[in-house]
Image (spheres, coloured by chain):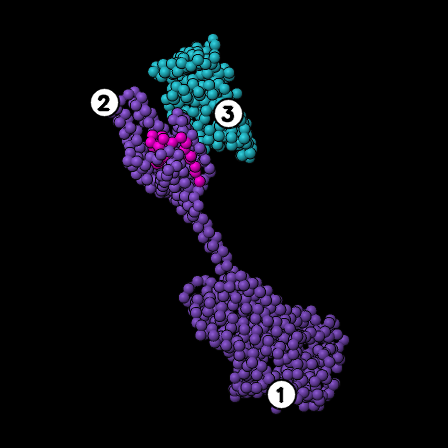
Amino acid sequence: MRPERWGSSRSVGGVVLRPPQNSLPLARLCAIALVLELALAPIPSLGATGESLLRLDHAEFVLSDSSEAPSDSLAWQPQGLPDDWVASRPDVWGYGWYRLRFVLPGEPHELYAVHLPVLKGVAALYVNGGYIGQTETFGRGDSTDRPSLETPLLVPERGLFAHVPRLFAIRPELLHTGVNTAYVRLQVRRGASGVLSRVTIGPEPLVRSEYDRTVFVSLSGPGMISIFSAGFGAFILLLWLRRRHESMYGYFGLTALAFALFVAGRFVITEPPIPFPYWGILVWVGLEGYIVFLCLFALRYAGWRWPRLERWLWAYLAVSPFIDYASFVGIGGWIPQHWWLMTFVLTLVYVGVFWATAWRRKTLETLGLAVAGSVKLIISANERLLPHPIDLPRYQPFAYVPMFMMIGWILIDRFVKSLNESEKLNAELEHRVAQKHAELEQSYRHMQQMERQQAIVEERRRIMRDMHDGIGAQLISALSLVEHGESSATEIAAALRECLDDLRLTIDSLEPTENDLLPVMGNLRYRLDGRLRKQGIDLDWQVREVPGLFCLTPQNVLHILRILQEAFTNIVKHAHASSIHVETGLDAAGEHVYIQVRDNGTGFCGEHAGRGIASMRHRAKIIGGRLEIKPSAAGTTLNLLLPVS
Amino acid sequence: MTTVMVVEDDPAFLTRFCKIVASDSELELFAAVADVASARQAMSKATPDVLLTDLGLPDGSGIDLIRETARRYPDTDIMVITVFGDEDHVLASIEAGATGYILKDSLPQEFVHLIKQLRAGGSPISPVIARQLLKRLKPAGIAAAVQPMEETPLSVRESEVLGFIAKGFGFGEIARLLGVSQHTVISHVKNIYQKLAVHSRGEAVYEAGKMGLI
């Protein structure tokens, strides 16, 4: 039984196609026609078609375990090249020989070379009976050492993935004019693939340059793309780590990394670091992963939120490794074998999303992305879905590059734009703040001016009121004393002196206090001292520092001064005291500053003082304070309490 | 005997002051004039011990007279006569060189007492003025930090004295509180007056220098 799973029908990233003769009758006809054509074809001759290189696309084949070129008497069958062993000879493995004939028009003098773009399996090359070289040692895992079907995982599968193009040099002595014969001995192990591509023969420099091109396209080019993709993906991912909300960056970073893994595994790494089929699964997950991430990227790019589709995509990615495994070990039937078609479905999804976005936005950027995506789709489809000779170069990794560049450009453009935007925004903000600041300053200045004017008006009114109530009233009473002519000069002088005292009080109240009560008290004492001394009253001045009082406006200072002046006047006039104790301090609760005026007289709270005391209380209330008067046998204690805050 | 010259343009007050001076046995009236020119003339031959002057005079400012006298006759004590003892007038006078002030409505005995006190070396000072002086002449420590150019900062003791005066304490009380003699306190106050005068002269010199006058 032929293990289909290793066969060419498993198209691996577009490597191998199902050969047409396997399915359709028409294809089978074509195959027959091809065989006929091969049988009748002339032996290719160098220079016959004007080409300097000889390209051999047909050979003859015979199955033979012989370690030397089989004789011409065996049943050599015509065989077109490239030849996929597993497709041409299902269920057969072991050793086979290819015979290739070619004609050289003249005696070769320079070094010749043979280029085999694809050579899978263990192979050796002979020309005109001379040994040229081989790819590796024959015999390992040969037909006598077949691993059982039960242990397929132990089989190394190299042919499925990257392969190395081969170049063999031929010494000119081995060649001669006319028909030359080359033999390729090929060993195909059970479960492995075997391929002999078309063969190019010619002078060494020309063949080598073709070989170099092949190496670049199928090996080093994809290698560079893989490395670049990994680097760029890592960079974009790092960017995303710092800006988590920009999920587009995250998805594209993952896309690039997964793509790098796929390209490396599929085209670059010829010696897998882990055994098959795990290596195969890993590479396949790279492919499936990058397509899923690209779909998610496309959805974010379009600005579409389709959570259900996104969930399906993630589910696809989650189950894929298991289905890939099933596919590699050949279980599960049709679905695992055709699971790879899903990659095309999803490619169609993201290319579709790109086109829809291009249609909606109609920008160069979106259109460019759609075209790049389509190029990618067409090239992959061409190499995987349509007949594609096994030994032709695969441009799938290169097809990815335009799209990759486009997306990279879009992301960087976005990044730069948002940077510029934020800078512009900052500048604008600064400008606006400055503008607002200027406006505020202006309105503040305006307000200040208004407040100042208001304060001036109020102060003027207060001074007028004070003059009216204070000195005005006192002058009138002094005037009436003079007019009645009954008062003595001393009485009139006393009345006028009172006027002067009141005027000084008003002037003192205008003194800036800076919330300090002590200068107010100090000044009061300065004004009263002479009068008290004249009356023979001792003053015990126990004024101490007190907390700042915010109520000490000129108006309130005048109220305080008037209250205290009234108190002193009452003591001097009515109490017959010999000493007055004045004290300031903070009350126990710390809420009020008290001014205490205590005398040792007989009290002044009689009828005559009633109106004065009412007025004092009223003033205390205006300040927000309180007046306490405690008469006792030993004298009267007056406490004026002023609020601290 | 202390000789007193009075410069006052209000004849009633001039008469009153003359009477008060004449009534005391220790005081002698040197001259009584009503304007700056007469005052200058009076002092051209001899100088009084005490000059009492009003600020608003018909032919000039009393401040000028004070400045001139303080410069030319440093032995003369100058007192300014003021109605309210308000800071503007008093401070300007002190800056010009006055060492005391007297209220126009003072009773005769107060009047005589102040003159004698001034002569004995003490200058009366009100809490308001003390406060202003404290502000103008910052204590040494602060001055050194804030204004290194300050020429005549107050000493710690002087600012203490001013602080007490600003709170209304008398010289006697301050002497008791600081544990010094009343005489010491009085001399502190006189020093403070002089410092203000020197300070303002210093500023004037500085200003003049800036204007390129000297």
Main secondary structure found in the magenta portion: helix
The answer to whether residue A346 shows anywhere in this view is no
Is A407 magenta? The answer is no
Tell me the SS state at disc 1.
loop
Disc number placed over residue A484 in the picture, else none: 2
A86 w.r.t. B86: above or below: below
Tell me the SS state at disc 3.
helix
The residue tagged 1 is A89
Q: Give the range drawn in magenta.
A: A558-585
A635 w.r.t. A82: above or below: above
Identified by mark 3, the residue type is Ile
Between marks 2 and 3, how big is the CA–CA gap? 47 Å
Along the line of sight, which residue is nearer the eye, A620 or A148? A620
Confirm whether circles 1 and 3 share one chain.
no
Confirm whether circles 1 and 2 share one chain.
yes
**Coordinates of residue B82 in the picture (x, y in percent):** 39, 22
Identified by mark 2, the residue type is His
**Mark 2–mark 3 contact, CB under 8 Å?**
no
Specify few, some or many for label 1: CA neighbours under 10 Å numbering under 14, 14-19, or 20 or more.
few
- In the rendered structure, the colour chosen for chain A is purple
Kindly identify which chain the residue marked by label 2 belongs to: A
Identified by mark 1, the residue type is Arg
Between marks 1 and 2, how big is the CA–CA gap? 153 Å
Disc number placed over residue B186 in the picture, else none: 3
**Mark 1–mark 2 contact, CB under 8 Å?**
no
Is residue A112 toward the left or the right of residue B191 in the image? right
Which residue sits at x=33%, y=35%?
Answer: A604
**Coordinates of residue A501 in the picture (x, y in percent):** 35, 28
Quadrant position of the C terminus of chain A in the picture: top left
**Mark 1–mark 3 contact, CB under 8 Å?**
no
**Coordinates of residue A267 in the picture (x, y in percent):** 61, 73
